[in-house]
């Protein structure tokens, strides 16, 4: 690591400290956001007094003409999250923590979360920016992947460990090779 890279890391760390103090929350409640930003995925934090989760959503923008694009990552940080409503049942495979295999779990398709504070960040790799703000509304409806992620992290807060059906309880089914014959007329 050279001196320029070390300076960039210190500058970024200083920005993080300033952002955390701006939102007037305990530093440890910001940990899920920082982990999501730096390591990817969704994360949770809980102590005896408080809890928070960070949920990541990804939106891809692609230009058909130039054949280029980028993904925006939206990271929602929920301070003291509460489930207001769940809808649907989606069966999916998830891998969590130090477990070596994925497990079958059931997650809601939609989840309506209420929180004491909701902070949203948009990470734009094309511009190399992280826009972050506190949202006025305290209820957020998540659908699809962000809803599954939120349910997963909330399960960590409630039960600490995710329990599902291990992948080795699945059964392989072999099918015949498909024939790709074209009819000539």
Image (cartoon, grey):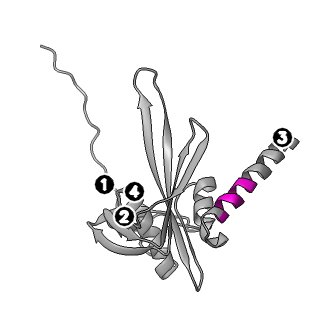
Which of these two is toward me, 113 or 146? 113
In front: label 2 or label 1? 2
Q: Residues within 10 Å of mark 1 (few under 14, many from 20)?
A: few
Left or right of 127? Residue 78 is left
Helix, strand or loop for disc 4:
helix
Query: Looking at the image, is mark 1 or mark 4 nearer the viewer?
Result: 4
Q: Indicate whether 67 appears above or below 18.
A: above
Q: Nearer the viewer, mark 1 or mark 3?
A: 3
Q: Can the viewer see residue 2 in this picture?
A: no
Residue wearing tag 1 = 173
> Could you tell me how far apart the alpha carbons at marks 1 and 4 are, in whole angstroms?
27 Å
**Secondary structure beneath label 3:** helix
Asked if 44 appears above or below 75 in the picture, the reply is below
In terms of sequence position, does the residue under pointer 2 or pointer 4 come before the other? 4
User: Which residue is the site of mark 2?
Assistant: 170
| Residue linked to disc 4 | 145
Q: Quadrant of residue 16?
A: bottom right
Dot 3 corresponds to which residue? 4
Q: Residues within 10 Å of mark 3 (few under 14, many from 20)?
A: few
Instruction: Out of 133 and 156, give the one closest to the viewer.
Output: 133
Q: Position of residue 65 (x, y in %)?
A: 41, 20
Give the extent of the magenta segment.
Answer: 13-21
């Amino acid at each position: 690591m050279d001196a320029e890279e070390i300076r960039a890391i210190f500058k970024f760390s200083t920005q993080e400290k300033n952002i955390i103090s701006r939102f007037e929350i305990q530093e440890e409640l910001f940990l899920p956001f920082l982990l999501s930003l730096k390591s990817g995925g969704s994360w949770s934090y809980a102590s005896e007094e408080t809890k928070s989760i960070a949920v990541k959503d990804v939106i891809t923008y692609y230009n058909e003409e130039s054949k280029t694009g980028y993904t925006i990552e939206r990271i929602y940080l929920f301070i003291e999250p509460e489930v207001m409503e769940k809808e649907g049942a989606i069966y999916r495979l998830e891998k969590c923590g130090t477990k070596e295999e994925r497990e079958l779990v059931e997650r809601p398709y939609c989840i309506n979360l209420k929180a004491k504070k909701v902070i949203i960040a948009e990470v734009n790799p094309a511009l190399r920016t992280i826009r972050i703000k506190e949202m006025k509304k305290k209820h957020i409806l998540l659908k699809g992947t962000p809803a599954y992620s939120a349910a997963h992290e909330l399960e960590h807060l409630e039960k600490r460990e995710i329990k599902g059906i291990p992948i080795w309880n699945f059964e392989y089914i072999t099918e015949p090779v498909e024939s790709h014959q074209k009819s000539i007329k």
